[in-house]
Amino acid sequence: MSEDRGPSLSPSAVRASQEVRGVIGPLRRRIGAAGGSEDISLTQASVLARLTGGDGLTASDLAAAEGMRHQSMTTAVTALAALGLVERRRDPADGRRLLIALTAEGRRRAAEGRQARGEWLAGELQRQCTEEERQAVIAAMTVLGRLIRD
């Protein structure tokens, strides 16, 4: 690394970064696929999960949170609306904005998906890991959690 970018990175920091990035993406896709929703894409399942626990988000908010273009998010939301899983409604605080919110069926499907993903991951950790390895995963998640907290 050049000196104007701060201190040199240790080989272990570089290796840890590579290892984490090499696992997180594929693991996220496997967990998403375990949600059991054959009729919706992983992006659409992620949108449902993101909309739980709130009064709705704009398509722009969803696109930013998912790291995708607004037009792509609009396509995903339109497909979810066609399935009756989300609805568009005016923002009560600003009538010019449209909020995307879960329908009752969307809440049910999001909860089912969350349950299925959690069961899949717990089952795989039980099946493939020793107790000591599971404890190491817990410790590693504590360390990685510090990276995402302010």
Image: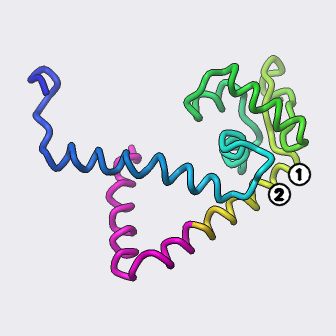
Place of residue 26 in the rendered image (x, y in percent of width and height, measured from the top left): 48, 49
Callout 1–callout 2 Cβ contact below 8 Å? yes
Q: Which residues are magenta?
A: 121-150
Residue identified by numbered label 2:
108
Left of 67 or right of it: where is 21? left
Q: Does residue 129 show up magenta in the picture?
A: yes
Decide: is 65 above or below 25: above
Structural distance between the alpha carbons of marks 1 and 2: 6 Å
Place of residue 150 in the rendered image (x, y in percent of width and height, measured from the top left): 39, 43
- Please state which of residues 145 and 119 is positioned toward the viewer in this rendering: 119
Type of the residue with mark 2? Arg
Q: Residues within 10 Å of mark 2 (few under 14, many from 20)?
A: some
Left of 43 or right of it: where is 146? left
Left of 54 or right of it: where is 31? left
Residue at image position (72%, 28%) is 58
Q: Quadrant of residue 96?
A: top right
Q: Which mark is residue 132?
A: none
Place of residue 80 in the rendered image (x, y in percent of width and height, measured from the top left): 82, 38
Q: Which mark is residue 104?
A: 1
Assign a secondary structure to mark 1. helix
Type of the residue with mark 1? Ala
